[in-house]
Image: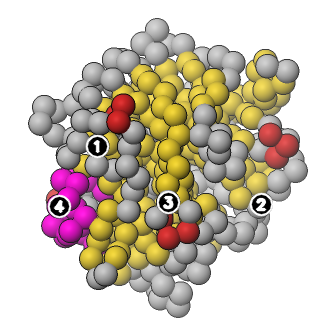
C-alpha cells in the first residue's frame, strides 16, 4: 500500500488543486528560555510529528538540506495497520511542501493533510484520503494559509473540520459543516481575546484546534499566571474549560501545545514556563470537559528544545527533546498520568510513532535518508532505510 508523495517542486499546482504557488515556513522548535518579559511565552512548536488511525501510522518530516528553507521538503510517510514497513512511493500531486505539512485524523481510517504556504503562495491546499492512502483527493483550499502549528487542523467525525489560519492580528479559526463547499469564520483571535474566557486568562494567541462531541475546542497561550487557555462555547460565549494546575506550577505562564479528541473527551499537552525553565505535562477531560486529570510534569532547562511531540499509546503523548550537546531524550506519557523515559534515541531522531502491540518506532532523518529504528528489548534496532529522491534547487 502506498501513500501520497507531495511533489518536491515549487511549480504551479495541477488543475485538481488550482493554480497555487507555495512559500517556506519551517516548523520551529520549543526552545527553553525565550520569553519576553511581561508576556506569556510564545513557544514555537515543531511540525514534525506522527499520528495513528485504523488505516495505519502516518508521519510528517522535513527532509533535504534543513539549513536552507528552499531545499527543505516535507514528506508524508505511511505504514499500513498490521504492517512493519514505511512507504513514500506514490504518484506526485503537483503540490510543493517547503512550508510544512499538518495532519488531522478524523474517526475511521481517513486522513486530512494541509500544506503550509511557501515561496510566493499564501494559500494552503488540503488533501484527503478515506482508503488508507491508496487515493488522495483535493479538499477545500485555505486562502489565508494554515498557521505553523502541529494542531492547526482538526477533522471532525461528522465533517465539521476546523482550521487555524493566518498569523498575528489576522489569526482566525475557520469551520466547515457537512455539505458545505467553503470555510466559514468561527472566531478571530481578537474576538476570542475579548470574550469572557479570553479576558479571564489574558489570551495572547490561539495555538491549537480540536473538535469534541461536535463542539469546537480551542487551545491558547495566556498571559495570566497559571491560567490554562482551553476554551469552548458556553452560554453563547467563549469560556475557559481547562484544568486547574497544581500549586507547584502556580505563578507560571501556560501554553497549550496540543489538543486531540479522545472518544467524547479531550487530551491536551501543556507547557508551563517561568522564563528560565519549562515543564511539560498532560491533562485529560471526560465528556463535558468538566472533570480533569493532571499528569506529572517533566522539566527542561535553558537551551533544551523539543524536536517533536505527538500522540502516544491510548490517551498518552510523547515528547522527543534535544539537549545543547545534541543528545536526545524520549519521554512517554501514559494514560495513568506518569512519564517514562525510554532508552536514549539515535541522534538523527526526528519523530516517534506508536503502533500496534505497544510497538515504538523512532524515525530519523539525514539529508535524503529516512531511517526507522524499532525498540526491541530496550535497544533501538535499525529496521528500514528509505532513500527519498530530493530535487535540490527545484524551489528556486
Q: Residue at the spot x=35%, y=36% of the render?
A: 247
CA distance separating discs 4 and 1: 14 Å
Q: Secondary structure at mark 1?
A: loop
Q: Distance between the Cα atoms at labels 1 and 2?
A: 39 Å
Q: Is residue 396 above or below residue 6?
A: above
Residue nearest the observer in this picture, 283 or 320 = 283
Nearer to us of marks 2 and 4 is 4
Q: Of discs 4 and 1, which sits in the foreground?
A: 1
Are circles 1 and 3 on residues that touch, CB within 8 Å? no
Other-residue count near label 2 (Cα within 10 Å), few / some / many at <14 / 14–19 / ≥20: some
Left or right: 304 as drawn, with respect to 192: right
User: In what element is the residue under mark 2?
Assistant: loop
Q: Which stretch appears magenta? A: 187-206
Please give the residue where the numbered disc 4 appears in the rendered image. 199
User: Which corner quadrant of the image does residue 316 belong to?
Assistant: top right
CA distance separating discs 1 and 3: 18 Å
- Give the residue number, with chain letter if any, for mark 2: 55
Q: Quadrant of residue 169?
A: bottom left
CA distance for labels 2 and 4: 42 Å
Give the prevailing secondary structure in the magenta stretch.
helix
Q: Residue at x 20, y 59 (%)?
A: 200
Label 3 residue SS: loop
Q: Residue furthest front?
A: 247
Say which label, 2 or 4, has the lower sequence index: 2
What residue is shown at x 42% (from left), y 13% (from top)? 324
First-in-chain label (1 vs 3): 1
Q: Which residue is mark 1?
A: 226
Amino acid at each position: 500500500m502506498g501513500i501520497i508523495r507531495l511533489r518536491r517542486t515549487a511549480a504551479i499546482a495541477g488543475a485538481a488543486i488550482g493554480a497555487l504557488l507555495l512559500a517556506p515556513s519551517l516548523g520551529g522548535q520549543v526552545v527553553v528560555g525565550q520569553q519576553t518579559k511581561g508576556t506569556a511565552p510564545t513557544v514555537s512548536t515543531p511540525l514534525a510529528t506522527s499520528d495513528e488511525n485504523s488505516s495505519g501510522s502516518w508521519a510528517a518530516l522535513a527532509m533535504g538540506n534543513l539549513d536552507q528553507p528552499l531545499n527543505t521538503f516535507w514528506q508524508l510517510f505511511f505504514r499500513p495497520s498490521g504492517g512493519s514497513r514505511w512507504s513514500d512511493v506514490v504518484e506526485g500531486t503537483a503540490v510543493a511542501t517547503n512550508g510544512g505539512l499538518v495532519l488531522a485524523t478524523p474517526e475511521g481510517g481517513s486522513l486530512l493533510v494541509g500544506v503550509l504556504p511557501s515561496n510566493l503562495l499564501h494559500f494552503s491546499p488540503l488533501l484527503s484520503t478515506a482508503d488508507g492512502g491508496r487515493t488522495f483527493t483535493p479538499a477545500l483550499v485555505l486562502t489565508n494559509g494554515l498557521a505553523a502549528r502541529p494542531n492547526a487542523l482538526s477533522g471532525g467525525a461528522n465533517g465539521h473540520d476546523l482550521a487555524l489560519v493566518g498569523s498575528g492580528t489576522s489569526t482566525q479559526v475557520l469551520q466547515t459543516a457537512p455539505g458545505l463547499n467553503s470555510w466559514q469564520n468561527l472566531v478571530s483571535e481578537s474576538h476570542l481575546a475579548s470574550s469572557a474566557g479570553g479576558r479571564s486568562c489574558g489570551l495572547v494567541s490561539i495555538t491549537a484546534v480540536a473538535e469534541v462531541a461536535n463542539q469546537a475546542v480551542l487551545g491558547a497561550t495566556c498571559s495570566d499566571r497559571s491560567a490554562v487557555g482551553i476554551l469552548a462555547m458556553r452560554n453563547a460565549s467563549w469560556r475557559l474549560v481547562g484544568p486547574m494546575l497544581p500549586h507547584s506550577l502556580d505563578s507560571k505562564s501556560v501554553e497549550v501545545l496540543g489538543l486531540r479528541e479522545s472518544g467524547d473527551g479531550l487530551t491536551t499537552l501543556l507547557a508551563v514556563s517561568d522564563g528560565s525553565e519549562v515543564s511539560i505535562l498532560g491533562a485529560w477531560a471526560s465528556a463535558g470537559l468538566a472533570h480533569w486529570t493532571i499528569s506529572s510534569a517533566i522539566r527542561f532547562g535553558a537551551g533544551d528544545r523539543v524536536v517533536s511531540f505527538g500522540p502516544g499509546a491510548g490517551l498518552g503523548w510523547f515528547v522527543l527533546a534535544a539537549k545543547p550537546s545534541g543528545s536526545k531524550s524520549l519521554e512517554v506519557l501514559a494514560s495513568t498520568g506518569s512519564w517514562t523515559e525510554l532508552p536514549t534515541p539515535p541522534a538523527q531522531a526526528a519523530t516517534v510513532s506508536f503502533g500496534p502491540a505497544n510497538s515504538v518506532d523512532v524515525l530519523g532523518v539525514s539529508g535524503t535518508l529516512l531511517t526507522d529504528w524499532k525498540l526491541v528489548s530496550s535497544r533501538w534496532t535499525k529496521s528500514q532505510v528509505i532513500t527519498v529522491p530530493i530535487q535540490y534547487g527545484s524551489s528556486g
